[in-house]
Image (cartoon, helix red, strand yellow):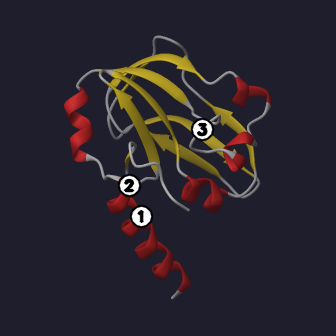
Amino acid sequence: MAYPKQFRYTKEHEWVDAKGDLATIGITDYAQHELGDVVFVELPKHGAKIEAGKSFGTVESVKAVSEIYAPAAGEVLEANPALHDTPEKINTDPHGAAWLIKVRLANPADLAKLMDAAAYEAYVAEKSKETSA
């Protein structure tokens, strides 16, 4: 899997695609693969404040319910309405149509602390070795 180069990534397997102080956040292909078939997504409402490193929602799969953590602080502008009726989109297009939320970042410079695509790919490769060992 090639991870989009313009995204930044967290160790909890969230991605963020920022343009200035506007950002789109989702979960990575690795995360959706680990979760299995996604059956429900709980996301914050417009206007909700999210804090870096804190949970802002959940993704429920046939295997488990997993928290989603904010890669940066900000205010929710929109939650992806398509995921309400078709949460399984996360399994087929996690880096595209299955984005989770759009936010106005409190401090766009915070994203510099996150991994770039190459660092994330190396991190995932290491994780995969650990689980197959």
Report, in whole angstroms, how far the alpha carbon at label 1 lies from the one at label 3.
Answer: 18 Å
Q: Position of residue 114 (x, y in %)?
A: 29, 47
Q: CA distance from mark 3 to mark 2?
A: 15 Å
Of all residues, the one furthest to the bottom in this rendering is: 133
Task: State the image coordinates of residue 88 (x, y, percent, origin top left).
Answer: 76, 43
- Tag 2: Cα neighbours inside 10 Å, few (<14), some, or many (≥20)? some
Above or below for 59 versus 51: below
Q: Quadrant of residue 52?
A: top left
The first of marks 1 and 3 along the sequence is 3
Q: Are marks 1 and 2 in contact (CB under 8 Å)?
A: yes
Secondary structure under tag 2 reads helix
- Decide: marks 3, 2 in contact (CB < 8 A)? no
Residue 54, disc: none
Relative depth, front residue between 6 and 38: 6
The kind of residue tagged 2 is Ala
Residue 31: x and y, percent? 56, 55
Q: Quadrant of residue 40?
A: top right
Give the left or right position of residue 6, taking residue 13 as reference.
left
Q: Residue at x 67, y 54 (%)?
A: 64
Going by the picture, which residue comes out furthest to the top?
A: 47
Q: Badge 2 is on which residue?
A: 117
Residue highlighted by disc 1: 121
User: Is 7 located above or below residue 83 in the figure?
Assistant: below
* Disc 3: which residue: 96
Mark 1: which secondary structure? helix
Image side of residue 47 versus residue 10, left or right:
right
Pick the residue in front: 90 or 2. Answer: 2
Q: Residue at x 44, y 44 (%)?
A: 15
Q: CA distance from mark 1 to mark 2?
A: 6 Å
Give amino acid for label 1.
Glu
Dots 1 and 3: beta carbons under 8 Å?
no
Q: Secondary structure at mark 3?
A: loop
